[in-house]
């Protein structure tokens, strides 16, 4: 019998507005890499607006293979990314602390999750770019939003 090389497969989705750093979060976690220049996720190979990486980690002597899907934040890709909510076990909602509109948009992203994802999907709220000096969203605001969303 063929062994897949892992005990569990977990599909995760990273969502949020364009430019909040979703791709860099993925690259840092999967490859310990960081890009200082901003490249829009257009996805190669198709479909456009989506890309993914795989990382295997070990938890309690079990190998967990994570498929982490990086979505494009632009409106024009919303219909494409909706199908990727299906089967997701976890969703990482990202905003940038130096971009208040990306923080304000979290409510709309949560609506997308409620509409398209499984009811029991695990949700995480990530405040990104905390190293930037032009902070527009306070830590307290982020904590309040997480509490309000129950994440």
Image (cartoon, grey):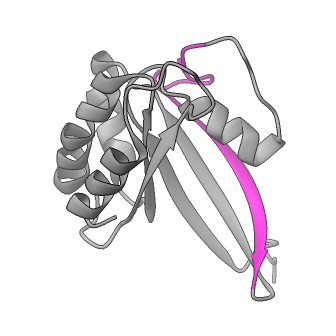
68 relative position to 29: left or right:
left
The question of residue 54 being in magenta is answered with yes
Q: Looking at the image, is 65 positioned above or below residue 144?
A: below
Picture residue at 79% right of the left edge, 75% below the top = 58
Q: Position of residue 127 (x, y in %)?
A: 47, 42
Quarter of the rendering occupied by the C terminus: bottom left
Picture residue at 28% right of the left edge, 23% below the top = 101
| Res. 43 image quadrant | top right
Q: Looking at the image, is 31 positioned above or below residue 119?
A: above
In magenta, the rendered stretch is: 39-59
Picture residue at 35% right of the left edge, 67% below the top = 121
The question of residue 119 being in magenta is answered with no
Q: Nearer the viewer, residue 46 or 94?
A: 94
Q: Looking at the image, is 146 positioned above or below residue 34?
A: below
Q: Nearer the viewer, residue 105 or 131?
A: 131
Q: Position of residue 122 (x, y in %)?
A: 40, 67
Picture residue at 55% right of the left edge, 29% below the top = 21
């Amino acid at each position: 019998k063929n062994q897949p090389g892992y005990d569990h497969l977990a599909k995760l989705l990273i969502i949020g507005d364009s430019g909040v750093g979703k791709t860099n979060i993925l690259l840092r976690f999967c490859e310990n890499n960081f890009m200082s220049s901003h490249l829009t996720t257009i996805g190669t190979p198709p479909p456009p607006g989506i890309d993914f990486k795989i990382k295997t980690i070990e938890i309690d002597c079990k190998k967990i293979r994570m498929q982490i899907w990086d979505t494009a934040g632009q409106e024009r890709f919303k219909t494409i990314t909706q199908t990727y909510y299906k089967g997701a076990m976890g969703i990482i909602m990202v905003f940038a602390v130096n971009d208040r509109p990306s923080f304000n948009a979290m409510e709309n992203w949560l609506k997308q999750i409620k509409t398209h994802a499984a009811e029991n999907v695990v949700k995480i709220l990530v405040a990104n770019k905390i190293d930037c000096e032009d902070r527009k969203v306070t830590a307290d605001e982020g904590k309040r939003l997480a509490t309000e969303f129950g994440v």
